Image: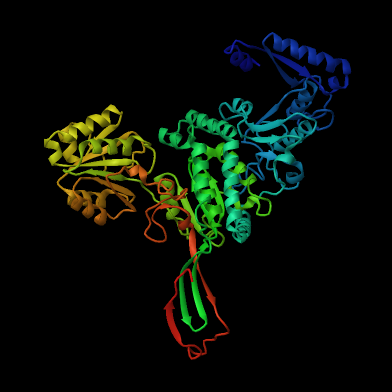
Amino acid sequence: MALYDTLFNELDVSSAQLLVTDSDFRDKDFRKQLNVTVRSLLSLKVIPIFNENDAVSTRKAPYEDSSGIFWDNDSLAALLALELKADLLVLLSDVEGLYSGPPSDPKSKLIHTYVKEKHRHEITFGDKSRVGRGGMTAKVKAAVNAAYAGIPVVITSGYAAKNIIKVLQGQRIGTLFHQDAHFWEPTKEVSAREMAVAARERSRRLQALSSQERKKILLDIADALEANEKLITIENEADVAAAQEAGYEKSLISRLALKPGKISNLAKSIRVLANMEDPIGRILKKTQLADGLILEKTSSPLGVLLIVFESRPDALVQIASLAIRSGNGLLLKGGKEAKQSNAILHKVITEAIPDTIGGQVIGLVTSREEISDLLKLDDVIDLVIPRGSNKLVSQIKSSTKIPVLGHADGICHVYVDKSADLDMAKRIVLDAKTDYPAACNAMETLLVHKDLVHIGALNELIVDLRVEGVNLYGGPRASSLLNIPQAHSFHHEYNSMACTVEIVDDVAAAIDHIHHHGSAHTDCIITEDQEIAEVFLHQVDSAAVFHNASTRFCDGARFGLGAEVGISTSRIHARGPVGVEGLLTTKWILKGSGQVVDGDKGVMYIHKDIPIDS
């Protein structure tokens, strides 16, 4: 009590100890007086602290006798919560909450929401608490009694800072007990494997639809996004606020935020995608192998895609719409920083999908399964597309047998040649860097021809970048000439209002620099010399190479793909902005009239190409 007094006094609040016994609660007058006393104390800014009066307790062995109305502090707390008609009961433990087994067992998982029907036969309790009378068994019993009498209960750690405040703010910590919990939690948690199998089965239903039916689903999703824009914005703002409070980097927060107009732009992209030619079942090549034997090479969905993404809730929308258009099943594993945004977007999208297909065609993995577990499902997942940091993409590429589509870095260059139109160069350079600095297609390195130094053009570019608030770092030549800090590496993606500047001798030196330090993403030349431009366009070995245009144009929507799952720097399957076509593979269809091989004596091969439209 002395400690309580000291701590509460710091908050200008007093505390008072109230000692009770089991027999007190058998007295109706006492229970009535209890309510009056507590409310009076609280009105006087006095915190009542209850405990059993062990000195006069009738309990034979206080730490062993569990008879009576209450038998430990947990059951006393539940009893008081009911008597006082509390809004919430928080039971503090020495662990994070209720686990499926002993917390010391690495296989045990924290249960976020207790569902009596699901968990009462599944939980294995460990040893009794070191700091209490009854351990977790007593806490769960007290929590269940209170919850099913109408008082919500949260069991959480008493050692973690600000846990009580976090509970009051509605954060998902500890274990929640509520009489309606069985309505919120599925009685059986669906594993990622089960979700992948369900997505494949549902995707086959999707593929069986007509092109118009798939188109209608996309149009319905676009309408649903716009109709729920306010709700989506509220959830996204909550994620952004939490990320800011947690101290995340500005570039991540920038990618996390759904800025004004973003939802309408996403809906517009989905409508563009819906109105494109149906990509499924297109005949790509037609060959007559022999008389009456026709072979067709057709486009076909890949199967089930796994998208692992950090922040970027807009990626969920783009990828989901592309999956539907291409007839693929989809598993989404988003970062915890975008949890609420992802949940509401997934809900809006899947509710727009007709029941004949089912929302399971797009699964949002929210279980505790780690990315490493998902990457082992090579028998049920056909392609992994990571969207996030360099570290995330690199880790995924090195830890799975499943093919990976994506890029680890977005180190994009703009080379300003000696024959460049300076006004054009200024516009392109500023746009490439400042339009959206956190994007993977933003300029990270500015290369300038040495002749532009002598005529003052380089200084003009530098001044314009500084006016816009861009922090500049130089290569060996530029840092000494411009008196700016030297970049620690040319192979660096800032994802912010910063870039590297270097001076090069000519277009050959620029190309060589890009090949040594770039990431084969997007690179641009600004020049009025068509010959020089052609050399750059054909020799730079990147997924996208531009002449007199901002690197920011490297985008699926801007390319007319409707949307993109990401930008690939791979050399196999798909490269650059990946739209619907990047999510397709091929299927060979052979139409015959009873032919057999018979040691290749059964037919006379002619291998004649047939016009596709015939």
Please tell me whether residue 592 is drawn above or below residue 246 in the rendered image.
below
Q: Nearer the viewer, residue 512 or 276?
A: 276
Q: Is residue 370 visible?
A: no
Q: Residue furthest left?
A: 454
> Could you tell me residue 532's position as x and y percent?
19, 51
Q: Nearer the viewer, residue 354 or 433?
A: 354
> Could you tell me residue 397's position as x and y percent?
43, 54
Q: Nearer the viewer, residue 357 or 197?
A: 357
Please tell me whether residue 584 is drawn above or below residue 517 in the rendered image.
below
Residue 301 lies left or right of residue 606; in this view the side is right
Q: Nearer the viewer, residue 128 or 406?
A: 406
Q: Residue furthest front?
A: 614
> Could you tell me residue 513's position as x and y percent?
22, 49
Quadrant including the N terminus: top right
Q: Residue at x 66, y 52 (%)?
A: 358
Q: Residue at x 61, y 27 (%)?
A: 169
> Could you tell me residue 14's position as x and y percent?
65, 11
Q: Residue furthest top?
A: 44
Q: Is residue 354 visible?
A: yes
**Quarter occupied by residue 128:** top right
**Quarter occupied by residue 228:** top right
Residue 187 lies left or right of residue 317; in this view the side is right
Residue 61 lies left or right of residue 217; in this view the side is right
Q: How is the image coloured?
A: rainbow
Q: How many numbered tags mark residues here? A: 0
